[in-house]
Amino acid sequence: MPDGGPPTIVSIAERAGVSIASVSRVLNGVGARPETVRKVERAAAELGYVPNAVARSLKGGRTKQLTFAMQDIGNPVYVAMVREIQAVARAAGHRLLIHSTDADTEEELSVVRSLGDRRSDGLILCPIRITPEHIEVLENAAGPVVVIGALPERVRVDAVQTDSVAGAQLAVRHLAETGRRRIAFVNGPLDTVPGHNRRQGYLKALADQGLAHDPALEHATDFGLAAGRAAAHRLLAADPPPDAFFCANDQLALGASQAVHERGLRIPQDIAVVGMDDSELARAGWPPLTSVGLGSEERGRTAARMLLERLGDAENPAPAAARRTTAQPRLVVRASTVAGHVPATDPAGTA
């Protein structure tokens, strides 16, 4: 490589013994004689030339890459979304780039702003908080964005939502119908969209079922497994203890189940446990967890299709107005609330 720097169109032309114009035609896929193509390709390989995708996107307008940014790639909910988004993207000839933000607001804003770098044609963003800064950056993004999550109606950005308020109501109603009266709520941070909405559903369902709200039966820290275990231990020390746990996601529910087992209690005979998301964790728990599915696969698939539609082309122009669609929650009953229960229809095809 000349002078230790990266290979250029000039250095390739010198190595191949052809003109700069000939190298340009070969590298851009424009017609050239077979012998010239062979010389240029051989020289480029010897020099370690790597095509600049950014430059090519600036010239051709598209990178054929999409980005999906979410809180935690280790969360089974996001894994399910990735599978669906990638399948749709691949079928349309796009690659998928994955970005894990750790729910850091500045990181999420940075990902949106990076659309201006033209390294990706569009972004699917799944934030758990929506701040005024999010709204400003989303509405001024340099490329198309689809949000998986709730956005104010006035925001001119496509969004795929789920009704987690209604989902929480399904969970609490089910527990009440199985005879539970002291239903504890294990939640994540209240300043997040899911934390706020799932609490609203919990409170509304208690009122609808004629059950008193006891603040001592609520615990909110984080959405992880360890937080669920610690919260359950604390709540089980109450006098009287709860007879059921409603957990804001399956990770919390699995942690709560661990605490129940560690105290020598039985699920569901002594205490019932319900999660949310109906992820792979729900089916892997012991006993398998009753959980409220929030359409993770459907939301991922729909978001990917909306993003491709937003990119548009000459034959299929992008939609004029921002769009909203909502995935409806679905309760899947398993043995963590009804002993020995096997769901009649399990989305994953397993008990």
Image (tube, grey):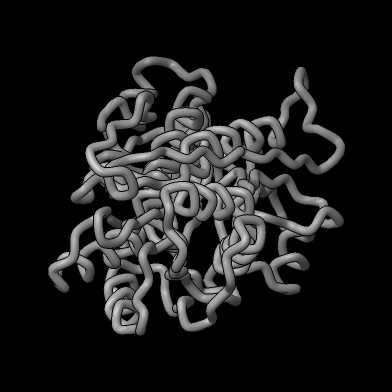
Q: Pick whichever, 301 or 77, lies toward us.
A: 77
Q: Does 335 appear above or below 247?
A: above
Q: Does 70 appear above or below 220?
A: above
Where does the N terminus fall, quadrant-wise?
A: bottom left
The residue depicted at 34 percent of the width and 18 percent of the height is 35
The residue depicted at 57 percent of the width and 65 percent of the height is 211
Give the percent coordinates (x, y) of residue 88.
Answer: 50, 28
Quarter of the image holding residue 324? top right
Where does the C terminus fall, quadrant-wise?
A: top left
Q: Does 93 appear above or below 331?
A: above
Q: How many marks?
A: 0
Give the percent coordinates (x, y) of residue 259.
Answer: 22, 70
Q: Pick whichever, 155 or 273, lies toward us.
A: 273
Q: Pick whichever, 127 or 218, lies toward us.
A: 218
Give the percent coordinates (x, y) of residue 350.
Answer: 26, 29
The residue depicted at 49 percent of the width and 26 percent of the height is 93
Q: Does 348 appear above or below 331?
A: above
The residue depicted at 62 percent of the width and 49 percent of the height is 166
Q: Answer yes or no: is residue 76 visible.
A: yes
Q: Is 28 displayed left or right of 332 in the figure?
A: right
Give the percent coordinates (x, y) of residue 320.
Answer: 86, 36
Q: Answer yes or no: is residue 111 visible.
A: no
Q: Is 14 displayed left or right of 138 in the figure?
A: left
Q: Is 154 displayed left or right of 343 in the figure?
A: right
Q: Pick whichever, 56 or 41, lies toward us.
A: 56
